[in-house]
Image (spheres, rainbow, N blue to C red):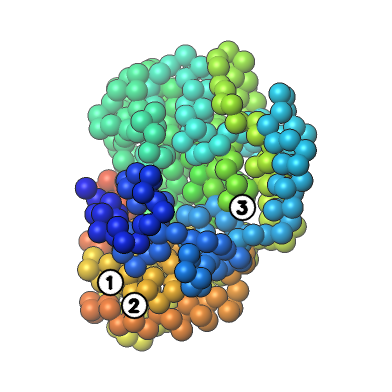
Amino acid sequence: MSRWTETVAGMEAELEGLAHVPRGILAYLRAGWAPEYPVELARGSGGRVWDASGREHVDWVMGKGPVILGHGRAEVVEAAAARAASGGLLPGLAPEYGALAARVAGAIEVAERVAFAKNGSDAVSIAMRLARIDTGRRGVLSAGYHGWDDRVQGAPGVAPTGVSDFGYDLDALERALAAHGEAIAAVLITPEPAFLGAAHLARVAELARGAGARLIVDEVRCGMRVAIGGAHERFGVRPDLIAMSKGLANGFPLSLVAGRADVMEASARTFVFGSNYGEAVALAAGLATFEIALAEGALARLADAGERLARALAAELTRRGAAACVIGPRAMPTIVFERPADEDAFYARAAAAGVLFFQDDAQCPSAAHGEAEITDTMGRLGPALDAIEGRGEVSDDAIRRYAARRMIAPGAFDVAHTRAQVLGP
């Protein structure tokens, strides 16, 4: 049993009205595993949420990444409501499907063709299917998290007809392709810009193409956050296919697969379908989100909010001599603690004080986070900062511990790359 499910098991008094919800499902829908995290949230507006008792919290989780414009953004809600009133799931494609596909293709260079689905795991699975049909091969070499679905889980070693995990280790990838390249349809990778930079992704692309495999970049986490297209765009690497989801529709369920026209047209030689893949309410929300994000520079604004939060935290950590730091891209800062006990205490006390951080992952600022949210956050964090007992510099081992959470094998990354991204006061 994980810490997430363990804490839910002890919260029966707080779960009234949720008797029919499986406890394991409920546990992972929360923002953190500490008991202080609220189980039910009643509403959200901008960068804040209110729990079932009416208590207000500053929200740095934002749906675990998707809500890039802020909760309840009026134009997105209005677009979704208008589409719902005209029918959300029609026996054919609503106009929003083609309109959003064209908008994505115009903004993301690799998106010569675009298809929509509902969640990140589905998008990755579709990309793998297209690569397999296009190449006539079955194997996939994978690095990183692609969702809980068994279809996208990688196993150690090399399975020429299945998904195998190379743990971001370039030497392991090179060996696997040298030994089994003729069986590998795709190399699938989730970028981790806090730990691995442009040179790493470029080398993955080079190795994949040298073996005749397709490069699939899972941009579910980084797309519409570190750049419109995600980390590959920021790093200047051109994949064959990308999968995106979080950030596309400001919290409405939507994902996409996009890429080279010839690879995407492999869809004509297989079967890719979901009853809700053409559902138009989320597509309308996605179209509104895309238009706002481009018109208002939303990604620059959320990155600025992330940097201001990170620097405010870093200043206070430095002042106290705390053994913690903030790393990673401004759009998704990660708080690193030397001592796991300090991390646990910090997030628990922050939640108790009305600040919800994304426990076990990067924080997710939005374009709606302004100076008031940062001021309120820092004003409430005294007890959480007091809970950090460790002193001194964060060690290389602590950074490696956080890399391991992102499924990065020991030795697969350079700690110096991560240290170069530490955000100071």
Between 83 and 411, the one lying in front of the other is 83
- Looking at marks 1 and 2 on the same chain, the residue that comes earlier in the sequence is marked by 1
Label 2 CA crowd tier, 10 Å (few <14, some 14–19, many 20+): many
Amino acid type of disc 3?
Answer: Asn
Label 1 CA crowd tier, 10 Å (few <14, some 14–19, many 20+): some
For disc 3, the marked residue is 250
Q: How many numbered circles does the render carry?
A: 3
For disc 1, the marked residue is 345
Give the CA separation, mark 1 to mark 2.
7 Å
Amino acid type of disc 2?
Answer: Ala
Q: Is residue 207 visible in this depiction of the protein?
A: no
- Looking at marks 1 and 3 on the same chain, the residue that comes earlier in the sequence is marked by 3
At x 61%, y 52%, the residue is 250
Does 277 sit above or below residue 325?
above
Amino acid type of disc 1?
Answer: Ala
Place of residue 337 in the rendered image (x, y in percent of width and height, measured from the top left): 29, 68
For disc 2, the marked residue is 384
Badge 1 vs badge 3, beta-carbon distance below 8 Å: no
At x 52%, y 67%, the residue is 50
Between 129 and 275, the one lying in front of the other is 275
**Image-quadrant location for residue 146:** top left
Badge 1 vs badge 2, beta-carbon distance below 8 Å: yes
- Mark 2: secondary structure: helix
